[in-house]
Amino acid sequence: QQTISAQVPGMLPIEQSYIENILRLNKGKLVSVHATFENNREWNAKIFNSANFDVLNLLFAYDSAENPKQIILNTAKDIAKWILDESGNKIPHTVKWLNYLQILKRERELNVDERNQLLDIIEDSNTDMISIVAANLLLDNQLAAERHFNKLDNNSQEVFKSFPIYRFWET
């Protein structure tokens, strides 16, 4: 692939590839690289789990940056959309949707279809309490989020607070 670089004083050169930029910005940090083969269920599941954690780490990076870069959010969105479209049942349905929709909420207000997806998650009797709290936060329903959060044990509350979606909690 041919790259085009431009040097701006005090800035890293701009590359054409998002991956090049992400790799350059994380130079010297440890990364996990997984090789896989087609139709290898065990490794394919690990790839999706690893990608899901990458989405969460990108959201942490975006949320904690003094001047967050849109490329971080775009990369997280691309990976989350890929997980949503391609992972089948390797990642729980609610996790895929909550991660994708929290990225969109960082960019804009959710539309009616997206909000209905969250209501479906809440109304599903198989949905865990943490996901119900998260869905209510994305719907801007702080009261319902707090009500369900208070039903969690202390350990689950601390786990929830460690997720990037907790940034939507109103204090």
Image (tube, rainbow, N blue to C red):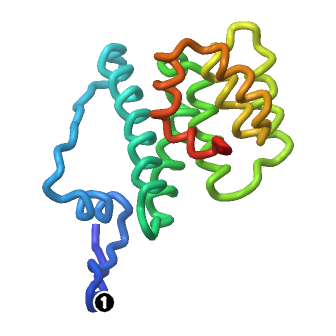
Q: Compared with residue 167, is residue 127 higher up or lower down, i.e. above or below?
A: above
| Tag 1: amino acid | Val
Image quadrant in which the N terminus is located: bottom left
State the residue at coordinates (31%, 65%): 21
Q: Which residue occupies the foreground of this view, 151 or 55?
A: 151
Residue 5 picture location, percent across and down: 29, 82
SS for tag 1?
A: loop
Please identify the residue farthest to the bottom as the structure is shown.
9
Q: Which residue is mark 1?
A: 8
Q: Compared with residue 39, is residue 19 higher up or lower down, i.e. above or below?
A: below
Residue 107 picture location, percent across and down: 64, 58
- The crowding category of the residue bearing disc 1, from other C-alpha atoms within 10 Å (few below 14, some 14 to 19, many at least 20), is few
State the residue at coordinates (17%, 50%): 29
Q: Compared with residue 61, is residue 41 higher up or lower down, i.e. above or below?
A: above
Q: Which residue occupies the foreground of this view, 142 or 90?
A: 142
Residue 115 picture location, percent across and down: 80, 38
